[in-house]
Image: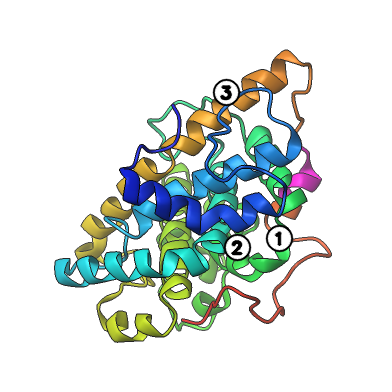
Amino acid sequence: MTLTRLDKKGEKLRIDSIKGEALNRDLDPARDYFKPDNGPSERAFHLVACGYDMLLTVSGQGFPTLDRRTRKKATKWMADASPYRGGQASTTLANLMARLMEQLDGRLTEDDEARVGKAHHRRLYKALEDFYPLENHKSLIFMCVGEFITLEKNRLREEVKTGEEVGSEYAQALLRGEDPSQDPRLVQIQRDWARDFFINTATFQLSRFLLALDFELIRDSAIKIATPTDRDLTGFREQQLDAWRQGMRAYMEYAEMDSAAADARGETPVYSKEDERESLFLGPADPTNDAPTNIPTGR
């Protein structure tokens, strides 16, 4: 599968949005680099292009609202802003897609088949960061993985710890001094919540970044999930999950092809404990106290 096919106007918008990322690496922004023998810079730029595919979804059916009029307005505004901020948003989304699949062991849901292992997803976002550094979106990524940190290390987000936000059943057990990691039901609940929290946080903040001041005009209709037990938002969570599944198709197809090529070359990566710690910012690079960089992370 190549990138999403667009009409002439849509293709021009894609090129205008990510041409800076291509030209900075002496690459052709109009070329589709979906091939198994990419060089390092070609691989990194193709991931950016996959990020733009996700941006198309986020700016359409993935925008975090239940109001159709707001979604229609946001779609137009985000398309207008894309030539100016779409490159950075696409790069960030490419990194986020790979990191989400790393945390989920290659499966969005338990029913999915893991065609690409977490070590390969990590390899891809590391390849991306070699050319498009992490510093531009480190604070946002730390926010997104917050509930995965709870799942893997039983460490609560500050908002849950202080009672500002209601945690999942898993988090509530931790607050009572229990060990929910021994209960498979609670582990699954937390896994699903960590995934949906990641998706919603990423979508909300990237929409806010791309729309800039215009976001404030529709902010009251945008949904930032803070309560995993809110049954009224069950359908919304499913809607966002479906949008990300669609938006990730180009990335997942490329990840599968690229990982198979790496395996054939004898370059299969190994996932270590240190990799896991680094992916959750639990080592020296923990950005807990970092000020937001170019991507706004306010609530």
Pick whichever, 296 or 228, lies toward us: 296
Q: Which residues are magenta?
A: 272-277
In the rendered image, which residue does mark 3 sit on?
257
In the rendered image, which residue does mark 1 sit on?
134
Q: Nearer the viewer, mark 2 or mark 1?
A: 1
Q: In the figure, is residue 283 to the left or right of 243?
A: right
The amino acid sitting under disc 2 is Ile
Give the percent coordinates (x, y) of residue 178: 55, 61
Q: Measure the alpha-carbon separation of dots 1 and 3.
A: 24 Å
Q: Nearer the viewer, mark 2 or mark 3?
A: 3
Q: Earlier in the sequence, mark 1 or mark 3?
A: 1
Q: Is residue 120 above or below residue 211?
A: above
The amino acid sitting under disc 3 is Met
Pick whichever, 179 or 118, lies toward us: 118
Q: Measure the alpha-carbon separation of dots 2 and 3.
A: 26 Å
Q: Residue at x 46, y 36 (%)?
A: 250
Q: Measure the alpha-carbon separation of dots 2 and 1.
A: 9 Å
Q: Residue at x 71, y 80 (%)?
A: 289
Q: Is residue 281 magenta?
A: no
Residue reaching furthest top? 264
Q: Earlier in the sequence, mark 2 or mark 1?
A: 1
- Local packing at callout 3 (Cα closer than 10 Å; few below 14, some 14-19, many 20+) is some
Give the percent coordinates (x, y) of residue 122: 68, 41
Q: Residue at x 77, y 49 (%)?
A: 130
Taking the image as drawn, is residue 192 in sight? Answer: no
In the rendered image, which residue does mark 2 sit on?
141
